[in-house]
Amino acid sequence: NAGVTQTPKFQVLKTGQSMTLQCAQDMNHEYMSWYRQDPGMGLRLIHYSVGAGITDQGEVPNGYNVSRSTTEDFPLRLLSAAPSQTSVYFCASSRRTGTRNTEAFFGQGTRLTVV
Amino acid sequence: GESVGLHLPTLSVQEGDNSIINCAYSNSASDYFIWYKQESGKGPQFIIDIRSNMDKRQGQRVTVLLNKTVKHLSLQIAATQPGDSAVYFCAENMRGGSYIPTFGRGTSLIVHP
């Protein structure tokens, strides 16, 4: 019963490098989202998707790209890493029931350091 | 509860006491609210939820109260245990919106044995 799986768990990047944070869920959830969490801060929404082929920007989208080609996967791409992107990243998914959704299930997080 | 600033609000309690964590939400159109618990080094986990057509909902040792008039949510934990030490977040989902939750900054609960 995997739930939401994020890889890698830890990553160190040099400024200007690119990378993709992977997120996969096996619950057939329609909704997926990416958050970043900085010390003393809550979870800030980066990008989200309400279904395969549909993505939209959240509160802090700059510097990040996403795509949703399948229901299961929602990768987050950093095109040119900057020290300000040092953070813990969480992927989440939730299910739609009629016109409502359910609670979000979170992955274990990816701790990213940009030097 | 929620506050502006760099430091996470903190609530310190003794083991066995009852804890009350407060949250002010922002959008009067929000119709679904969830409390999450985040232990150190882990992702947030669902505790309890409440729809806007309810004022109160009880779970095992936890109760959520919703006051829509003042847009306030609280989480009550009975007989707090050391294992309850964590950061607690409230999240709101807006009716007619994306149904992606918006999170508050969180409250750190510290339980002293």
Image (spheres, coloured by chain):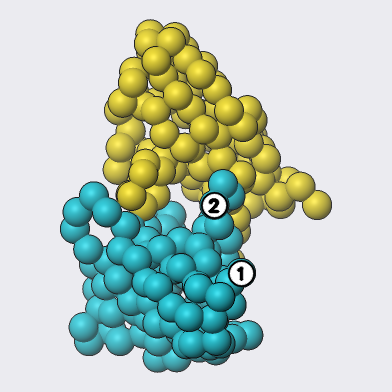
- Discs 1 and 2 carry the same chain letter: yes
**B29, B46: nearer the viewer:** B46
Residue B35 visible at all: yes
Disc 2 designates what residue? B40
* Picture residue at 44% right of the left edge, 82% below the top: B19
Q: Position of residue A39 (x, y in %)?
A: 36, 44
Q: Chain of mark 1?
A: B
User: What residue do we see at 39% from left, 28% from top?
Assistant: A86
Q: Secondary structure at mark 2?
A: loop
Residue A112: give x, y in percent of width and height. 48, 27
Q: Position of residue A20 (x, y in %)?
A: 54, 21
Residue under numbered circle 1: B83
Give percent across and percent down for residue A83.
Answer: 33, 21
- The disc placed on residue B27 is none
Quadrant in the picture for residue B31: bottom left
Q: Residue at x 41, y 43 (%)?
A: A37
Choose the circle earlier in sequence order: 1 or 2: 2
Label 1, label 2: how far apart the Cα atoms are = 11 Å
Question: Can residue A49 be seen here?
Answer: no
Q: Colour of chain A?
A: yellow
* Towards the viewer: A49 or A42: A42
